[in-house]
Image: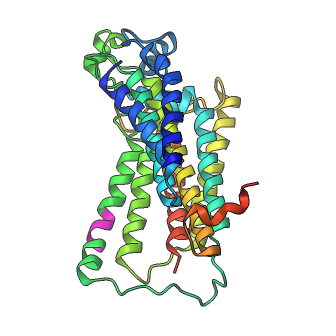
């Protein structure tokens, strides 16, 4: 359990705390974004191998045994995908916040209680 | 206050559940079976130096098509939610841009565009690739929005930039199925000499297409978010 995994774990719970307790829609979206970044950090940290380099092979690597010199490329590729999806989801949430603000001129979730049953 | 306390207790319990999963992850000593194969074969099989690119574009190319599709659907959703009312003749009031921003924006714009093209055409050789290059391309459009109050996106060009690269990307996938080993196989074109710009089969072409598409989609998001009064 490295320091990066601990930070990612803490960031995830900070984000979830913000989503649960904040009243402002924009602050909830920021909390969601922080949560997202915490998960990315954990995923990248899982693929890290102590003392190895990035999985970009040059002549130096090809001549020797490349497999023992690089970190795991699969979590990096997964996080690259997850960042793009996170960006799309965040921008869609912001667009919904803009639409709600247009309807009722308020960003506080106390004004949108008609979704509660 | 009670609500906040309840939230803290709920989060603490959740942390208790998740914590064992995290502590069980030991430090990784060597690559797994799949990663081992990818690192081993990236240069031998595909002639790609950047293993992440090889995984993203060829070995898991189907995931990347899905990713581009998700981005496209999100853009469509934002365009639908924030569609401009009576867009004919109605313009959001904007402040006149400052002279310094205008001039430095015109100076920086070509540099940013060239840098983005550099990033997405060299995705198989160095860190970078279509998504990163596309984001840099969209940042040049953001600079145009900020530095030029009269700037408006040409929607015909935008639509062409969104549809044609996506279509060619999927077409290339099916061509790989017919002419080569499988869907999105990059060995349609000769692999060339590893480490050169024109090498690694169709990977630079696919990454350029992804870069253009991502840039166009993010610019469309900026356009629909920036059109607010």
Q: Residue furthest front?
A: B2
**B69 displayed left or right of B30:** right
What span is colored magenta in the figure?
A: B106-110
Q: Quadrant of residue A44?
A: top left
Between residue B211 and residue A80, name the one nearer to us.
Answer: A80
Between residue B131 and residue B2, name the one nearer to us.
Answer: B2
Q: Can the viewer see residue B194 in this picture?
A: no
**B98 displayed left or right of A117:** left
Query: Does the segment drawn in magenta span residue B119?
Result: no
Q: Can the viewer see residue B125 in this picture?
A: yes
Residue visible at 51% across and 38% down in the picture = A82
Residue A67 point in image, percent of width and height: 37, 12
Q: Residue furthest right?
A: A117
Residue visible at 35% across and 37% down in the picture = B127
Residue visible at 54% across and 34% down in the picture = B10
Residue visible at 43% across and 44% down in the picture = A34
Residue B89 vs B69, above or below: the answer is below
Residue B6 vs A9, above or below: the answer is below
């Amino acid at each position: 359990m490295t320091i990066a995994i601990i930070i990612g774990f803490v960031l995830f719970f900070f984000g979830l705390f913000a989503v649960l307790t904040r009243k402002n829609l924009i602050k909830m979206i920021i909390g969601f974004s922080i949560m997202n970044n915490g998960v990315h950090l954990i995923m990248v940290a899982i693929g890290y191998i102590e003392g190895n380099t990035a999985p970009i092979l040059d002549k130096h690597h090809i001549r020797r045994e490349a497999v023992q010199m690089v970190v795991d490329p699969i979590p990096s590729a997964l996080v690259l995908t997850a960042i793009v999806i996170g960006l799309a989801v965040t921008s869609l949430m912001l667009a919904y916040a803009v639409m709600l603000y247009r309807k009722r001129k308020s960003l506080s979730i106390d004004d949108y209680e008609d979704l509660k049953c | 206050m009670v609500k906040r306390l309840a939230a803290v207790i709920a989060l603490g319990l959740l942390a208790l559940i998740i914590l064992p999963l995290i502590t069980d992850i030991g430090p990784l000593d060597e690559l797994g079976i799949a990663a081992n194969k990818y690192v081993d074969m990236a240069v031998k099989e595909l002639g790609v130096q950047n293993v992440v690119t090889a995984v993203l574009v060829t070995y898991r190319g189907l995931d990347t098509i899905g990713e581009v599709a998700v981005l496209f659907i999100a853009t469509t959703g934002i365009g639908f939610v924030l569609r401009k009312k009576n867009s004919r003749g109605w313009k959001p009031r904007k402040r006149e841009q400052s002279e310094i921003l205008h001039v430095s924006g015109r100076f920086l714009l070509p540099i940013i565009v060239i840098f983005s093209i550099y990033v997405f055409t060299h995705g198989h050789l160095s860190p970078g690739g279509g998504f990163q290059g596309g984001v840099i391309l969209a940042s040049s459009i953001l600079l145009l929005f900020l530095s030029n109050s009269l700037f408006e996106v040409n929607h015909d060009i935008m639509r062409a930039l969104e549809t044609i690269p996506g279509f060619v990307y999927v077409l290339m996938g099916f061509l790989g199925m017919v002419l080569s080993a499988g869907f999105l196989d990059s060995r349609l074109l000769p692999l060339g000499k590893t480490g050169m710009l024109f090498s690694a089969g169709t990977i630079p072409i696919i990454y350029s297409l992804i870069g253009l598409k991502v840039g166009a989609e993010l610019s469309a998001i900026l356009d629909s978010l920036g059109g607010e009064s």
